[in-house]
Image: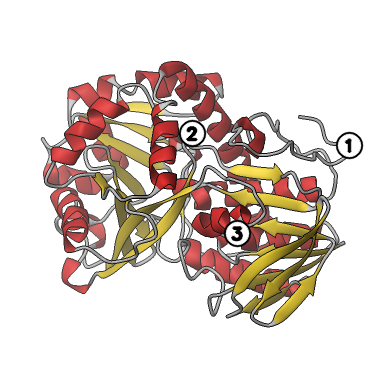
Amino acid sequence: MNIIVLGSGVIGTTSAYYLAEAGHQVTVIDRQSAPGMETSFANAGEVSPGYAAPWAGPGVPAKAVKWLMMRHSPLVLRPAFDADMWRWMFQMLGNCNQKSYEINKGRMVRLAEYSRDCLVQLRHDTGIAYDERSKGTLQLFRTQQQLDGSAGDIAVLDRYKVPYALLDAPGCERYEPALKNVRGKFVGGLQLPGDETGDCFKFTQRLAELARERGVQFRQGVTISRLVTTGDRITSVVTADGELTADAFVLALGSYSPLLARQLGIRLPVYPVKGYSITMPVVDAAGAPESTVMDETFKVAITRLGDRIRVGGTAEIAGYDLSLRQARRDTLEHSVTDLFPHGGDTSQAQFWCGLRPMTPDGTPLIGPTPYRNLFLNTGHGTLGWTMACGSGRVLADLVSARQPEIGLEGLFMDRYANGNGPIVVPVGVTV
């Protein structure tokens, strides 16, 4: 089939790669000058299936009130007269209970574990390199309450047989030796040895090259205006370069996916949540992290990427605002200098922000829509890099009317009614 993928971030690019591997002719369209230039550009660098969890959980509303009062808050809310913002937040609150949390985390872990396996296989098959390390993630707890609160997550990890180790403070220091310099600032941690790290932007750019070698065409710098329909099919996409036809279309525009879908009468429960990062050079390798340390107090990930340190975090709910705010940089710098004071040079740090496409329950939207030849691959939130390869592989299987290798329960858009019509599942695919 001739397939058009809308979006060339890590999700769109992995979709295109796996579609080409499945034998399709693929064209990718994106407004940016090159693949991976928006949310994939400078994210936290984690490939963390073990840390895959929804933001909505029991006790989160009370925690959110506390976070909003913190100087270095992991959550920032900028209220606006935006019905989509409030609808999304109310739907998220509806998932803040133990039953929903366990269901949603289970779905996310299932996809994230599969995605990590797909990434390992891709690396083996192609030799793709992107400052990758396979040394795991350490979720660092500064308080005993945080350590005790990890029991719920551990139960889910046990259920899905995800390897982990609960460490005391000396155990954390053995895993991340530089932490011995700040002894007394943490009580323990949850180590996830199956997690990896890597530069998502480098990966996306290199995978785009591999996709081109397989015949994929990338049309960059092309603005997408609308999709044209006839009955229950998409016939073409209207762009700044003219109208382009295809047999099937994949919507992978991240936070902007709902804006295009809305023109078709489809309401997607995806809303942008802005995240920030700083990237600085390593000045003392012995004082820098070996892999990723997640500072649980500030919800900040500190990741080693070759000779750089990437520090990412903050959930700012402010619509499509891309302004850089100094207070958010202060939080990132506070976390990294508090835990790794000698590792990097913050005076040379590059400051960045991107819009994470979040669903209220944390699980992305992958697969069919009410239009039989329109497919979704969006809504991955903070885990787009973690879930990219698995999502691309599942998407390619669905477009090809093949049964994916993992269960599909909870991945389709119809888990949210939202006034949408029934989806059209490809013949031969069972949920």
User: Disc 1 to disc 3, how far (Cα)?
Assistant: 28 Å
Q: Which residue is mark 2?
A: 361
The tag earlier along the polypeptide, 1 or 3, is 3
Residue 428's tag is 1
Q: Is residue 139 visible?
A: yes
**Residue 282, image x, y percentages:** 26, 66
Q: Determine whether label 2 and label 3 are within 8 Å by CB.
A: no
Q: Secondary structure at mark 1?
A: loop
What is the distance, in whole Å, between disc 2 and disc 3 at their CAs? 21 Å
Q: Is residue 318 left or right of residue 426?
A: left
Badge nearest the viewer, 2 or 3: 3
Name the quadrant of the C terminus.
top right
Q: Position of residue 156 (x, y in %)?
A: 48, 22
**Residue 36 versus residue 239: which sits nearer the camera?**
239
Q: Quick one: SS at disc 2?
A: loop
Near mark 1 (Cα within 10 A), the count class, few <14, some 14-19 or many ≥20, is: few
| Residue 404 drawn at (x, y percent) | 76, 39
Quadrant position of the N terminus in the picture: bottom right
Amino acid at circle 3: Leu
From the viewer's perspective, is the residue at label 1 or at label 3 nearer? 3
Q: Residues within 10 Å of mark 3 (few under 14, many from 20)?
A: some
Query: Label 1 amino acid?
Result: Gly
Amino acid type of the residue tagged 2 in the rendering? Asp
Q: How is the image coloured?
A: secondary structure
Q: CA distance from mark 1 to mark 2?
A: 28 Å
Name the secondary structure under disc 3: helix
Instruction: Say whether disc 2 or disc 3 marks the residue closer to the N-terminus.
Output: 3
Marks 1 and 3 in Cβ contact (< 8 Å):
no
Q: Which comes before the other along the chain, label 1 or label 2?
A: 2
Q: Residue at x 85, y 45 (%)?
A: 401
Q: Residue at x 54, y 34 (%)?
A: 108
Identify residue for label 3.
260
